[in-house]
Amino acid sequence: MQPIVLGIETSCDETAIGIVRGRTLLANVIASSVEEHARFGGVVPEIASRAHLEAMQPSIQRAVSDAKISLRDIDAIAVTAGPGLVGALLVGVASASGLAQGLGRPLYGVNHLAAHVSVDYLTHDKPTDPTIALLVSGGHSSLLQVDDITGSITKLGATMDDAAGEAFDKIARILDLGFPGGPAIDREAAKGSATALDFPRGLTTSNDWATRPYEFSFSGLKTAVARYLESTPKYVRADVAASFQEAIVDVLLLKALAACKETGINSLVIAGGVAANSRLRAVAEDRCAKAGIELRIPSPGLCTDNGAMVAALGSLMLSAGRPATRGAFDADSSLPVERVSL
Amino acid sequence: MAGAGAMTISLAIDTATSRTTVGIIEDGVLLFEKFHEGATDHGRALSELVAEALKVSGPPDVVVVGTGPGPFTGLRVGISFAHTFALARQIPVVGICSLDAISINQPEYTVAIDARRKEIYWARYKDGVRIDGPHVSKPAEVSDYIIDQYPGALKLVALSESQNISEPMYLRRPDAVPTAERT
């Protein structure tokens, strides 16, 4: 029988528990405090941390019940050790430590970003690595070269200002579409034209391609949209949403496919909350098919923050013979992606 | 809780102050108590101290945890750990007001815990009973308080016979301004 791993994720506003047996998903419970943050226009760390503490025990109990196992059946615990909101991470790490010590089982402190990529293992038979990974969410926008998901990840580039999901949130706010902005813009854009307006693609000049080919910048795009709205009182909201979304999708995929070409790795995983965006998925499929690149995008429910991805990475660590985290450890809010585990 | 006469082993945890305190009490006898000083070390310290504590006795029958008031981030570490440890062992958790667990040998006194932002959490006691608080205030608004004492494992466990607080005692709302109210 393959080992059972329970994963705990609390890096932002989702209290998420996943349970896997080997590469089979047994449970994926997500309690989100997103509604409590909506009226603040973004995630409030203290509200998120309080919600994690409240949701933790019932979420673990539900996951164990969904998986039709008992807590004693769990062979190892994995927890997001970073990066993320430190107060939020600490609730997850302390809960995981209590559970691991209570059960007498090993504990893996793992990287949130690597976990996002590793969730792909739950939906595909073939191993993913080596692969290029585009990780896009409310807190992160990174392009990674993954040679070994359990130990060797290289950051090719990341955003120099806003994360892609953050840009969605900010534009949704000025378009009065509410929070979180990603799904709201996706819905609005479906009613508009992606080519109605030509918004800038950040860091895509020939000089940028020569000096920082895999870095992203979305602040110029944000400013361009805001200026357009100011100067065009009778703007068509759906067209603005669709054209803004197109600019983001275009630049993300231009750079991701360039990374595939440059490294000779014909595999691309897109993960993180923004990977749930329907336009990103459609354009990625089209462009990857034309370029002969194998594309993998987890199902939308596994793209946003979840515990299954943490359990998946823990399970991969276990089966690769990687040692559990030795001794006690702290959450690391700025854990670099190169550190797959502690 | 085990009834009278039965042997009860309690694991006591408090992270409401800059200290992380862990103790093992068996039928009112303190078998182990250690603390670690460090306002940002609760997670690491707690895990290490509990591992050490579990070696001195049989498995605990109950976890007793200080529920504050105290600075939020550290406070949640102790409560989170206590809850999942107890869940794993299928044993109960009893929550205690951390200020109540500070032992002061006086008939009447006020004790305080640093609440950061130049404020204190405090409560007043008479004949061993809390008569005012817990509150959060500016120090100047509270007279004659004792602040250099810490919750103890023995008192946490002693109080578990008579109180059980299930929620963390934050006493402050999260700092956040709704978008509509921003200027």
Image (cartoon, coloured by chain):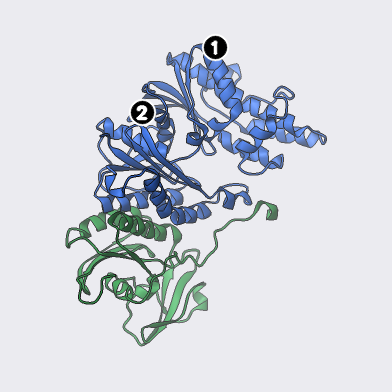
Chain colours: A blue, B green
Measuring from the top left, give residue B134's x and y in whole percent: 46, 74
Toward the right, the furthest residue is A234
Q: Which of marks 2 and 1 is nearer the N terminus?
A: 2
Tag on residue A240? none
- Residue hosting label 1: A290
Q: Looking at the image, which residue is at 64% across and 29% down?
A: A245
Is residue A213 shown to the viewer in this render? no
- Residue hosting label 2: A149
Measuring from the top left, give residue A71's x and y in whole percent: 31, 49
Please say if A312 is above or below B171.
Answer: above
Measuring from the top left, give residue B172's x and y in whole percent: 53, 65
Please say if A33 is above or below A205.
Answer: below
Front-lying residue, A35 or A109: A35
Residue B177 lies left or right of residue A155; in this view the side is right
Amino acid type at mark 1 = Lys
Please say if A92 is above or below A26.
Answer: below
Q: In which quarter of the image is residue B156?
A: bottom left
Is residue A276 shown to the viewer in this render? yes
Q: Looking at the image, which residue is at 69% across and 53% down?
A: B180
Q: What element carries label 2?
A: loop
